[in-house]
Image (spheres, rainbow, N blue to C red):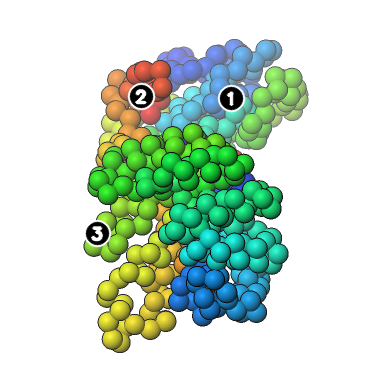
Amino acid sequence: MFIFKKEQQTYDFGGVKIGGHPGQNPTVLIGGLFFKGQPIVKDTKEGTFDKSLALDWIDIAMDMVEKTGHPFIIQAFGRTPAAMENHLAWLSENFSGPIMFESTNADARVRAIEYSHETGLQERMIYNSINLSMKDDEKQVLKDSGLNMAVVLGWSPRATSLQDRMKTVGDMLETARDLAMEKVLIDPATMPVGAGYGLELRTMIAIKSELGLPTCLAPHNAPSAWRFIKQPGLDDESTHMATVVASTVAAQLFATDSIMYGSMIRTKEVFAAVALISNAIAAAVAEAINVLGIERPLFIPPTFE
Amino acid sequence: MNNDHEWPPVAGDFDVNDPSHCVAICTLGKRIEIPGQYSIAGSCKTENIGIERIIINIISNPNIRYLIVAGPEVPGHLTGRSLRALFLNGVDPDTRKIIGAEGAIPYIENVPPEGIDRFREQIELIDMINVLSLSQITEKVEQLAGQNPGLFSKDALWIEFKPASGEARRAISSATIIILPEYDLLLESNSSLMAKQEAHAIVTEHPSSIVIEVRESDTGTILVGKEA
């Protein structure tokens, strides 16, 4: 929990405020839907899924939003253009918050951009992500789409030091501006355990203190690829849950404004953990700004006491 | 007044108007020219040495019975709130910390306990923190002058002002954590403030610590002189 001297930007992403000083706005939680391996998913190519269970998951999330005050965004996956369209079409009817879309398939991403444009969903669609591997044709589609919110990924295979990673962030920000992205979320990119995991937390501090821009992170990627919890005796849901929760609240304490926590199957537990730490941040920041004589509105989380 | 001494004993950023007047005015973070009659009026930036100087100048003049604390509160130091806490609660005899003060380093180390007790007995503190209006301040001065209880029952108390070297305070204020050495980014542990390391040199310790900081800004390097 830190007070930055640098002025901090806050943007409205489809009705959800992200950014500001730690404690100023509630940490936003971004839950993943339509991941391969999720019990709701039936066919990743077609984009078929258990709609009833998906609705239950969204209901749980909205209930936790109401209880804790932490806003929620859905991170929607789609393996193919058809799957992406199916997912977005259903989500646009059954979820009213912002949607961050993502795919490893460029055609699926392009379809999502086009679909947002055709259906007028741009106001609540966040492109994930502008990064070094983005090709020119996709850039052009994004630029022409009217979509103006995006994740900017500060990752490069050659950026191994903080200053290199910040240079990558700067380069990608420039690309984002060229593509008419007005609201950006800077993601310093979570690295695998033992191969750089933790350096994104340093970069997070540098982004906030040097640039003052809203941030996001997907820290669940570290435990999800961690071999330690794949061995017999540890490869169970409660152990995985503990590591995902730990990585999430670590990011929360390191001034991450919005956090992708992975599968929405863990929504309830992640929200509860973040709501707890949010109380610690609120009390600590309130004391710190008092010492500094700063007047600033803070997010006061419910204590339930 | 004692003829062996010159009042006020401690120099500072203030104006002396009428030493026989019963009202002193502290305008906290900003020097404000006060029209009309008063005893002494000036700014006070720090919640330690600044307050010590006020105490010493007040207890050496038994005519002063009111201290108006007005003007803009000093960010970080919270000098006005510290002064108010001192008046209301006094100082912890062991740690020398102003009880209940919220400022960054609210320690009274250069005034003995009898000086602090005397200050709290002699004056009534009038809380006008963050009041900048000249008319409101002068109106209050006139009102207080009209209810002057007269000379304090004890003689002037003269205390020699010998500020400590500042080592102790510097030790506290330098309690920083290096977060990102690549960007000279430090975390000040006493305030949670994330700030750039600012190279500075102490140019004087008396009447208070004055440092020159070297700061980098968008327009180049600037030197900033300020009270530590």
At which x and y percent is residue A265?
A: 52, 75
Point out the tag, 1 or 2, that comes first from the N-terminus.
1
Residue farthest bottom in this picture: A233
Give the crowd class for mark 3: few <14, some 14-19, many >=20 residues within 10 Å.
Answer: few
Left or right, B1 with reference to B109: right
**Are circles 3 and 2 on residues that touch, CB within 8 Å?**
no
Q: Are the residues under badges 1 and 2 in a single subunit? A: yes
* Depth check, front residue: A2 or A137: A137
Q: Residue at x 64, y 23 (%)?
A: B22
**Are circles 1 and 3 on residues that touch, CB within 8 Å?**
no
- Amino acid on which disc 1 is placed: Thr
In the depicted structure, whether residue B200 falls above or below residue A35 = above
Indicate which disc residue A195 carries. 3
Q: Residue at x 67, y 61 (%)?
A: A92
At which x and y percent is residue A206?
A: 37, 42
Q: Quadrant of residue B166?
A: top left
The Cα–Cα distance between marks 1 and 3, rounded to whole angstroms, is 56 Å
Q: Chain of mark 1?
A: B
Q: Which residue is mark 2?
A: B215
* Depth check, front residue: A300 or A119: A119
At which x and y percent is residue A246?
A: 40, 68
> Of tags 3 and 2, which is closer to the observer?
3
Q: Chain of mark 3?
A: A
In the depicted structure, whether residue A276 falls above or below residue B193 = below
Q: Which residue is mark 1?
A: B27
**Are circles 1 and 2 on residues that touch, CB within 8 Å?**
no
The Cα–Cα distance between marks 3 and 2, rounded to whole angstroms, is 36 Å
- Amino acid on which disc 3 is placed: Ala
Q: Residue at x 58, y 76 (%)?
A: A49
